Amino acid sequence: MDGEVRLGLIGCGGQGRTLSTALARVGGGVLTAVADVDEKTGKRFATDFGVKTYYPSYHELLEKKDVDAVIIAVPHFALKTVAVDSAKAGKHIFVEKPMATNSVKAKEIVKAAEDKGVKLMVGFCQRYLASRSSMKNLIDKGAVGEIDLVSGSKGAGLLRGWLLERPKGGGITLYLGVHLIDQVLWMVGSRVERVSAEVNDHLKFGVDETSSFTMRFRNGVLANLNLTMRASKSIDWMEVVGSEGYMKSEWRTNTLFVQSSRIAEYSNPATIQFMEDPTYPMFEREIKEFVSAVSEDRPPAISGHDGVRVLEVIDAVFKSAQTGKLVEP
């Protein structure tokens, strides 16, 4: 594609602002139109970001020929419908995680995108966090040898708004769990064979408040992940144990602990401190990847199929918790 990629933003809330700020910083694309059901929010966004055209309906935006691709940053329950409509309109798609509220709906998005031949990328931004991408690179170099065990936790305080409504895709597992699951699938490089889970629901709101689950991968790796919205502080860490090493990454401190008997420079335990903000650079790298994929006419690094596999695990988590049985995704 010659010139800048022309993008439309659907959803002008907080995440829409974050991604649009990232787009402005990295270049390669330009916002030509925005849409939001809340007129005040949409018009304020358009003014703040210097976008000439605001639409109260995303359907109007999708009709515009000066929009090559869309960034979809709407609540969980609306993601599938907006993404499918965008694909049918022939627009390349960046859709925020979790992509949909379950794997069946996610597959509809993938099919729609494939039928129209448009790019589809899911917003698993933490793949672009310096400590996590470095962890992945070291795994690929054999730093820990053969992976045996992966563990991780993510926690936050009580969620708000529609995130506390189950029919709208609320709950901690869809909100934060998708990040951890995606990163584990990415690092392990194998399909999940079965899932065992326990879930506690919030007594007042009825959404999943705490979840703990184990995944057995086809290559024998075990992974245990824990999620909660009862944390007094933000929690976000991941560790990998292998036959020849150990690594642990923390988001907030943007640090990576490495010990490896295979790579000489890490034969003594080392802590790497990444001297950058742990939040905004990952969004910049993420959105740059999407814009570059559209411009270069290539598949984006994170595919719709990646999103489906994450949601298949989440479906299995909820089914296992409900039935008390092991579940195959």
Image (cartoon, rainbow, N blue to C red):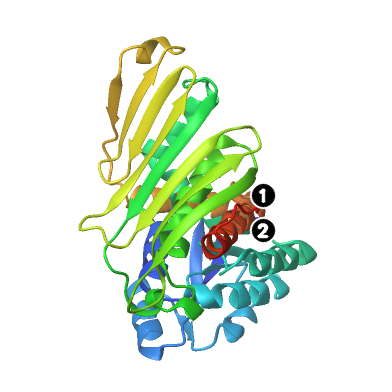
* Label 2 SS: loop
Contact, mark 2 vs mark 1 (Cβ under 8 Å): yes
Look at label 1 and name its amino acid: Pro
Number of other residues with Cα within 10 Å of mark 1, as a class: few under 14, some 14 to 19, many 20 or more? some
Q: Position of residue 213 (x, y in %)?
A: 48, 50
State the quadrant of the C terminus: bottom right
Number of other residues with Cα within 10 Å of mark 2, as a class: few under 14, some 14 to 19, many 20 or more? many
Q: Mark 1 points at which residue?
A: 299
Q: Which of 311 and 197 is in front in this view?
A: 197
Q: Which residue is drawn at 66% across and 54% down?
A: 305
Is residue 3 visible in this depiction of the protein?
no
Q: Where is 263 relative to 197, above or below?
A: above
Left or right placement of residue 208 versus residue 89 in this view: left
Q: Name the residue under label 2.
A: 119
Q: Where is 216 relative to 210, above or below?
A: above
Look at label 2 and name its amino acid: Lys
Looking at the image, which residue sits at the far right?
115
Q: Position of residue 197 (x, y in %)?
A: 50, 54
Left or right placement of residue 122 versus residue 41 in this view: right
Q: Where is residue 181 in the image (x, y as percent from the top left)?
A: 50, 49
Q: Which of 131 and 158 is in front in this view?
A: 158
Q: Residue at x 56, y 66 (%)?
A: 6
Is residue 220 visible in this depiction of the protein?
yes
Q: Nearer the viewer, residue 7 or 109?
A: 109
How far is the residue under mark 2 from the one under mark 1? Answer: 6 Å
